[in-house]
Image: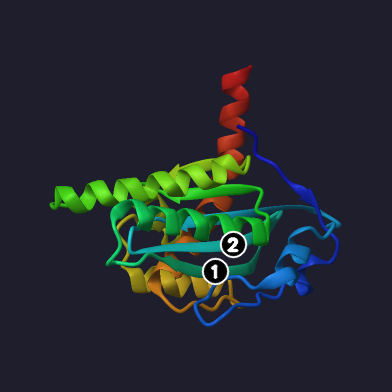
Amino acid sequence: MQLGGRRSEGFGARFRFLAGKDGSPSSETNREHASLARMSSTVRIIGIDPGLQRTGWGVVDVTGNRLSFVACGTITSTAEDDLASRLVELHDGLTAVIEAHGPDEAAVEHTFVNTNPTATLKLGQARGVALLVPAKHGLAVAEYAPNAVKKAIVGAGHAEKEQIQHMVRILLPKAVWKGADAADALAIAICHAHNRQTLAQAMRMAGA
C-alpha cells in the first residue's frame, strides 16, 4: 500500500467538471484533466460514501494544505433488480468515475451498523464494491468511521449533516452537488486529505 502523488502545472484553473444530468462524468475532457502534468506535488483523492441504493463519490486535489474541488456525483442502482445486478451497477459506475478522473488514493466510510440486519448486510456488500474497485485500479484505500469524518470536517464527532455540508462548502467553495451522498463523499475525501500524512508516517514506522 503506497500513498502516491503527481506533479502539477497550474492545476487550479484547469479542472472543470463536465457532467451529465445524472451527475456522472462525461467524455474525454475529464480524462485529459486527470492526466495533466502538475507543477507542484499534488495528490488526487476520491472519497466514497457506499450504499446499495446510492453511492456518493467526490474527488478533490490536495497540494500542500490547499484543497481544490474536482468533481462529485452519485451512482444509483435499480431497486427492482436482483442484488447481484445492483452490485454490478455500482461496480461499473465506480469504475467509470475512477477511469475518468484518475485519482491517486481513495477513502471509504466504514459501514454504519443499524438495527435492520438485512439492510446492514446489503450495505456491507455495497461497501465491498467500494473497496474493491479502487483497489483493483492500484489505489491505496483508507477507511474512516463516520465520527472520524465528522470530527475532521466540523471538529465534533456528532455533527449534523447540515453542519458537515456547510463546512464542505467553506472548504470547497466551488463544489456543487445534487444530493447528500455526494456531499458526504467530499467530506470523506477531505478527511483523508487531513489524515493521509499521519497514515503515511505510521506505515513508514511499521515498515522500519
Q: Choose the circle earlier in sequence order: 1 or 2.
A: 2
Residue ranking furthest to the top: 208
Residue 85, x across and y down, in percent: 37, 56
Task: Please tell me how many numbered marks the rendered image carries.
Answer: 2
Q: Is residue 79 visible?
A: yes
Which labelled disc corresponds to residue 56? none
Indicate the amino acid at tag 1: Cys
Tell me residue 93's x, y (percent).
51, 61
Res 163 → quadrant: bottom left
Q: Is residue 109 above or below residue 60?
A: above
Instruction: Name the residue furthest bottom.
Output: 21
Please tell me which residue is depicted at 74% across the width and 60% down the height of the picture. 34
The residue lying at 78 percent from left, 74 percent from top is: 13
**Disc 1 and disc 2 in contact, CB within 8 angstroms:** yes
Q: Is residue 152 visible?
A: no
Horizontal side, residue 202 vs residue 99: left or right:
left
Pinpoint residue 66: horizontal percent, then vertical percent.
68, 61
From the image, tell me which residue sits under label 2: 59
Instruction: Give SS at disc 1.
Output: strand
**Residue drawn 36% across the image and 46% down it:** 110
Q: What numbered label is drawn on residue 72?
A: 1
Inter-mark Cα distance, 1 to 2: 6 Å
- Residue 73 is left or right of residue 164, and the answer is right
Q: Quadrant of the C terminus?
A: top right
- Choose top left, top right, bottom left or bottom right for residue 53: bottom left
Identify residue type, mark 2.
Answer: Val
Q: Secondary structure at mark 2?
A: strand
Q: Residue furthest left?
A: 115
* 133 lies left or right of 63: left
How busy is the neighbourhood of tag 2: few (under 14 within 10 Å), some, or many (20 plus)? many
Q: In which quadrant of the rendered image does the N terminus lie?
A: top right
